[in-house]
Image: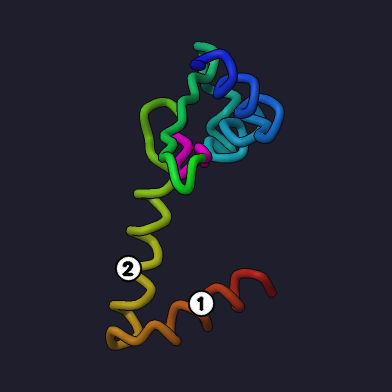
Amino acid sequence: MLERYQALLHKGFDILYIGRWVLGRYRNAATEQLQADYRNRRQQGRYRIIDVMVEGISMGITQRREFGSAIQQNGGKVDGLRQALRQKLG
């Protein structure tokens, strides 16, 4: 069963690219091969990936913190997050 999940992960996600992208300008300073892992959950009989972790850092938790910060900076309004995302997209 684990082999099926790993095959799905590697088929559906470019883990090395995600890891390099997350490291950004610091990727050239990395001396060890990037390590990536994922969490999944079963829903309606199917497993789905719910988080990707690169070098032990959860992308989901990181995103949650960034979203929460944007909401707080805009008076606790979720609309502030939407506006911040639009600004980032240009």
Q: In this rendering, is residue 55 above or below 41?
A: above
- Residue 50 highlighted magenta (yes or no): yes
Q: How many marks?
A: 2
Q: Secondary structure at mark 2?
A: helix
- 21 or 10: nearer the viewer: 10
Give residue 1's position: percent from left, percent from top. Answer: 51, 16
Which kind of residue does numbered mark 2 sit on?
Answer: Gly
Q: Quadrant of residue 21?
A: top right
Residue at (48%, 48%) from the top-left corner? 44
Q: Nearer the viewer, residue 31 or 62?
A: 62
State left or right for residue 85 relative to residue 79: right
Residue 6 in the image: state x and y as whole percent: 57, 20
Left or right: where 42 falls relative to 22 = left
Marker disc for residue 68: 2
Measuring from the top left, give residue 67's x and y in whole percent. 39, 66
CA–CA distance in space, label 2 to label 1: 11 Å
Q: Residue at x 51, y 80 (%)?
A: 82
Q: Tell me which numbered mark, 2 or 1, is placed earlier along the sequence.
A: 2
Packing grade of label 1 (10 A; few <14, some 14-19, many >=20) is some
Which contiguous range is marked in magenta? 46-53
For disc 1, the marked residue is 84
Residue at point 61%, 32% (across, down) = 20
Amino acid identity at mark 1: Ala
State which quadrant residue 80 falls in: bottom left
